[in-house]
Image (cartoon, coloured by chain):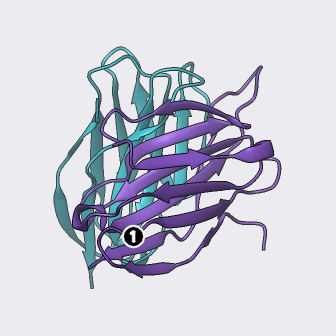
Amino acid sequence: QQPVQSPQAVILREGEDAVINCSSSKALYSVHWYRQKHGEAPVFLMILLKGGEQKGHEKISASFNEKKQQSSLYLTASQLSYSGTYFCGTASGGYQKVTFGTGTKLQVIP
Amino acid sequence: DTGVSQDPRHKITKRGQNVTFRCDPISEHNRLYWYRQTLGQGPEFLTYFQNEAQLEKSRLLSDRFSAERPKGSFSTLEIQRTEQGDSAMYLCASSVTQMTGRMNTEAFFGQGTRLTVV
């Protein structure tokens, strides 16, 4: 099952904050966040694992609520370079495939 | 360059023709994924390999699609008798999946192969 992301799109002014949510109908082992700019490949941002381990970008943080099967990506003091489409990917087990959501399109304007 | 490499970057083919794409993962990455992405959508899972073993193939994938990863290194994705609906970006990603400890680590994507079926 494909994870559901919200919102579908958001426009921010530079310096504003944003939260992108990802929820799954299945129990999750890991959540993976990527950003994709138009015409480019998705770029890894962060991974969150069941049990609390995480690894990722310095200026971007995320949370993982295992009980609610949800994750949120927090973008603070947004910069123009943050513009792009953000995808969350989820895996229900350590060896399971990663399935991606439909994306959240983020646009940061001056 | 030590990233994921895909070839070709662009492919235009006539309907009914066969096409083959190649992916070279990051060295020592034992997991390799193929995804398909259409405009405005997230990457759609096609299949993935752990070393040379194909662990899962999407049920949405027709028999016209086949993938291989001989010797657990590079992988090829072949589409037979292409249809216009096959037009998409085909993305390959690789990761390290460890047998113990931290499993299912971050995947790194290649630049993709854009297929246009005319």
Total count of labels: 1
Taking the spot 75% from the left edge, 29% from the top edge, the residue there is B98
Q: Which chain is purple?
A: B
B111 or B53, which is in the foreground?
B53
A84 or B68, which is in the foreground?
B68
Residue A74 coordinates in the image, percent (x, y): 37, 49
Q: Would residue B52 be seen by someone viewing this image from the given angle?
A: yes
Kind of residue indicated by mark 1:
Gln
Quadrant showing the N terminus of chain B: bottom right
Taking the spot 42% from the left edge, 29% from the top edge, the residue there is A64
Looking at the image, residue A48 sits to the left or right of residue A68; the answer is: right
Q: Is residue B2 above or below residue B75?
A: below
Residue A11 coordinates in the image, percent (x, y): 18, 69
Answer with the quarter of the image where residue B108 lies: bottom right
- Seen as rendered, the residue at the extreme bottom is A110
Label 1: few (<14), some (14–19) or many (≥20) C-alpha neighbours in 10 Å: few
A16 or B45, which is in the foreground?
B45
Looking at the image, residue B20 sits to the left or right of residue B41; the answer is: right
Q: Is residue A88 above or below residue A69?
A: below
The residue singled out by tag 1 in the image is B17
Q: Which chain is cyan?
A: A
